[in-house]
């Protein structure tokens, strides 16, 4: 099967090699006999709502965010349509912030967002930096652990009733106070975790792929055939241990 991926603003939003997440999706799809067809969608391009199964947005600093924010806000309706149609989406850090209602950066300027996630973000004085460990529950019987790295000035406040991606075990998370990290709407996931995120959290890569293949086939999601993931497990454990021992302190 061909999984059609829209990679938004790859030339602006790729801090901490966030595009590595695409490489993981590509490889894990190929190992199951699927092909990823990745199209860059950048400023001025239309987001084709009828031919995308998975949207990916990486992270970036305030300067890069300001360059793409108006264009991303204008794509808000198309993004909502895609997610409503059951397409999968992963957004990291700067992309995660701008998929909410807006981000007020360090210079006080408000960047309006795409309005997909029910949250708002304001930059604080101190950056929230370090290793992060989360407990996630993305469906019945699916308690999982996510390990990553965060580096953001933004404090993201979820609206009441919004669904977080996970509970912070170690690290700062959305705002360093709420105890929650990330946000989920349908099959859309936003998170502050860089690293890149997917190499050490292969279960999340497979969840996104199962959603995307279901969207491509017009079917219900099915779990993908398991892979050995020995190196991936070690990478997760190393990152998790680092987060437990020193995550989330000023
Ligand atoms: N500019 C944003 C912040 O510092 C996002 C940074 C990032 O993507 N790492 O909050």
Image (cartoon, rainbow, N blue to C red):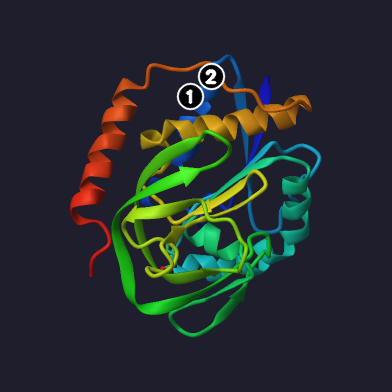
Is residue 250 found left or right of 144 in the rendered image? left
Which residue in the rendered view is the most extreme toward the left?
A: 245
Quarter of the figure with residue 123: bottom left
Residue 80 is left or right of residue 242, and the answer is: right
Q: Is residue 217 rendered to the left or right of residue 65?
A: right
Give the quarter of the figure containing the C terminus: bottom left
Above-or-below relation of 213 to 146: above
Q: Mark 2 highlights which residue?
A: 30
Question: Counting other residues with Cα less than 10 Å from the Cα at mark 2, is it few (<14), some (14-19), or many (20 or more)?
Answer: some
Q: Is residue 56 visible?
A: no
Ligand 1 quadrant in view: bottom left
Q: Are marks 2 and 1 in contact (CB under 8 Å)?
A: yes
Residue extending furthest toward the right: 50
Q: Position of residue 237 (x, y in %)?
A: 26, 36
Residue drawn at x 52%, y 66% as measured from the top left? 65
Residue drawn at the location 22% of the way across and 43% of the way down: 241
**Residue receiving disc 1:** 27
Q: Is residue 204 above or below residue 111?
A: above
> Is residue 128 visible to us here?
yes
How far across and how far down the image is residue 131, in percent? 28, 53
Q: Total number of numbered labels?
A: 2
If the image is split into quadrants, where does the N terminus sit? top right
Q: Secondary structure at mark 1?
A: helix
**Which residue ends up furthest to the front in the rendered image?**
141
Q: Position of residue 27 (x, y in %)?
A: 48, 24
Identify the residue at image location x=25%, y=56%.
247
């Amino acid at each position: 099967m061909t999984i059609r991926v829209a990679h938004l603003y790859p030339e602006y939003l790729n801090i901490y090699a966030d595009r590595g997440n695409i490489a993981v999706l590509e490889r894990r799809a190929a190992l199951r006999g699927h092909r990823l067809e990745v199209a860059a969608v950048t400023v001025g391009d239309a987001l084709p709502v009828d031919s995308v199964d998975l949207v990916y947005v990486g992270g970036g600093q305030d300067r890069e965010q300001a360059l793409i924010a108006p264009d991303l806000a204008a794509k808000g309706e198309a993004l909502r349509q895609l997610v409503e149609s059951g397409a999968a989406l992963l957004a990291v850090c700067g992309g995660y912030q701008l998929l909410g209602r807006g981000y007020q950066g360090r210079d006080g300027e408000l960047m309006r967002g795409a309005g997909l996630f029910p949250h708002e973000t304001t930059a604080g004085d101190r950056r929230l930096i370090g290793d992060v460990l989360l407990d996630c529950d993305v469906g019945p019987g699916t308690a999982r652990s996510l390990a990553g790295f965060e580096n953001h000035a933004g404090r993201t406040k979820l609206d009441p009733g919004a669904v977080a991606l996970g509970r912070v075990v170690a690290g700062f998370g959305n705002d360093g106070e709420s105890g929650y990290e990330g946000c989920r709407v349908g099959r859309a996931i936003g998170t502050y975790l860089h690293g890149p995120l997917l190499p050490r959290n292969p279960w999340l890569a497979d969840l996104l792929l199962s959603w995307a293949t279901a969207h491509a086939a017009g079917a219900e999601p099915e779990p993908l055939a398991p892979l050995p993931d020995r190196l991936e497990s070690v990478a997760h454990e190393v990152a998790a241990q680092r987060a437990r021992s020193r995550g989330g302190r000023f």
